[in-house]
Amino acid sequence: KLNFYPTKKLYITQIAAHTDYFQQNPEGLNLEQVAENPRQANPDAIPFNEYQKTNRNKFGMHARYLLNKNHDFEAMGYYYSWRYKETSNKCAEYSDITNPGFTFQYNLHFATGKVNHSFGIGSDLKWQKISMYKLQSAADTLRVDSKDETNIETDSLLANQIIDQQSMGLYAIYNMEFGKFSLIGNIRYDDIENRLTDKMMGGDTAGTSKDFYHTSYRIGVSYNFYDELTLFVNWSQGFMPPSTEELASNPVGYSGFNTHLVPATSNSVEVGARGFFGEKIYYEITGFRMNTENDFFRFKQSGRGNQEVFYGNAGNSKRLGIETFISLKILKKLSLQASYTFSDFKYISSSVDPIYTDTSYVLTKPPEAGQYLPNSPKHQLYAEVVYTINKNFKVSIASEYQSKWAIYTDPDAYYNKLDPAVFQNWQQGFTLFHARVGYQWKIWKIKGECSIYVRNFTNAKYMAFTEPDPDGNSYHPGPGREVFGSVKIRFD
């Protein structure tokens, strides 16, 4: 990350990043395996080598130009490119992906009497191209456990396709401040076009398209009574179209789009308060209610491999919650930060496209009204105590807690109507402890920080997350004790 200031009016930030990521055997374990050895491979992987391999480059730049005190411009551009490979016991998928994008925004600031106004209009343009093909996997009966990327693939071509996506967003933002009162509002329009060209077919049957468009709104007000208390209320809408990965995971063929998917939408209201007491205490508490329509859920099909996952719309949900945060300076060198989240997320409707109740199409039933959303624990708590030894050294101890959560969306598995040796809907939560030591230094105009972070230093055994797998291979055990080293250098 580099920051440039060519003039007093121009600010530029440039970012470059590279990621080389390998995740072997990403599928979950079953209950019997978890009890035997949580480090073993998923049973469906043997004798295959299932993994995900990502090699990604990112380049981005953000610039802001201050024309004068009333006018300024912001622009952001980026370009991502990466190669991705995913193998399963059914096929090996190869993808080359490019993803450029650009955003431009104009801001106007002015005052009328005692009222300050800020108005912004902007647009973002994004493109994505995915060249993908799939080869059939073959079993390797002589394979032994290793971390290599060897996978036997036949010359049977299952898919060969190109996905093109382009999206345009137009938005306007308005902010008003009048004394202790403030108001913010914005409107946004999104238009997303997806095209898939099947290179194994010709004529009109070679192309599939799926387009989405939506207008969403947000408005919020706040009033600062005094430093210790500011009240705020926000109402907003959400729009989440299916991703290219979700569209391209077609349950009726190895190529083409899942044409039954529709966007998920939401309406949300939040009410809260925040404030600070001198330099000792800062707090924030927010309550929210979100109603969603056409939530996504995952399902599988027989004959398509155990790692391939497909997506559908699961009806509607109501999500109630409270989020809190407090920062407390106990002593000059001792501070505490803590956050707590309460979540009550339930499906309220199981009215779905009839295709998702067709057992020849899905192996997993859509959820019923009254079920909790999967992977949504009611209680989450994180707290950290930081002690500053001197101007160079800091140490901290942290703890995180997560209560139990539901695993399955299928109502038969959710209500324990299936074999309890394979399906148990509720996963117990966990408590972890972490520690960090940091050292800050300065040599001439060069500043830096070195740190060592130990996560789960008590080496507790816990379940990091679960997935609603129709085979019961739902469990992903968390790692034991982990040690991370970090070095940051800053040139002023």
Image (cartoon, helix red, strand yellow):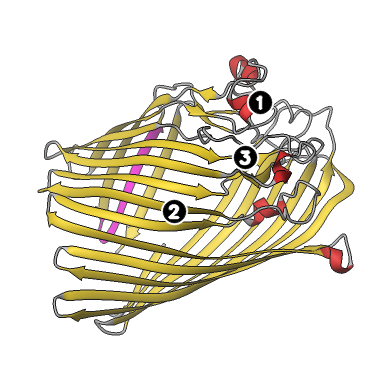
Q: Nearer the viewer, residue 353 or 239?
A: 353
Residue at the spot x=87%, y=59% of the render? 200
Cα distance in 3D space between marks 1 and 3? 21 Å
Q: Main secondary structure of the magenta part?
A: strand
Instruction: Locate residue 490, reporting x and y percent.
Output: 33, 58
Residue at 14% in and 67% down: 179
- Tag 1: residue type? Gly
Q: Is residue 28 left or right of residue 63?
A: right
Instruction: Give the Cα distance between marks 2 and 3.
Output: 36 Å
Q: Secondary structure at mark 2?
A: strand
Q: Which mark is residue 23?
A: 3
Q: Which mark is residue 472?
A: 1
Query: Which residue of the protein is positioned furthest toward the bottom in this rendering?
Result: 67
Lower position in the chain sequence, tag 2 or tag 3? 3
**Secondary structure state at the residue bearing disc 3:** strand
In the image, the segment drawn in magenta is: 443-454
Depth check: 31 or 404 in front?
Answer: 404
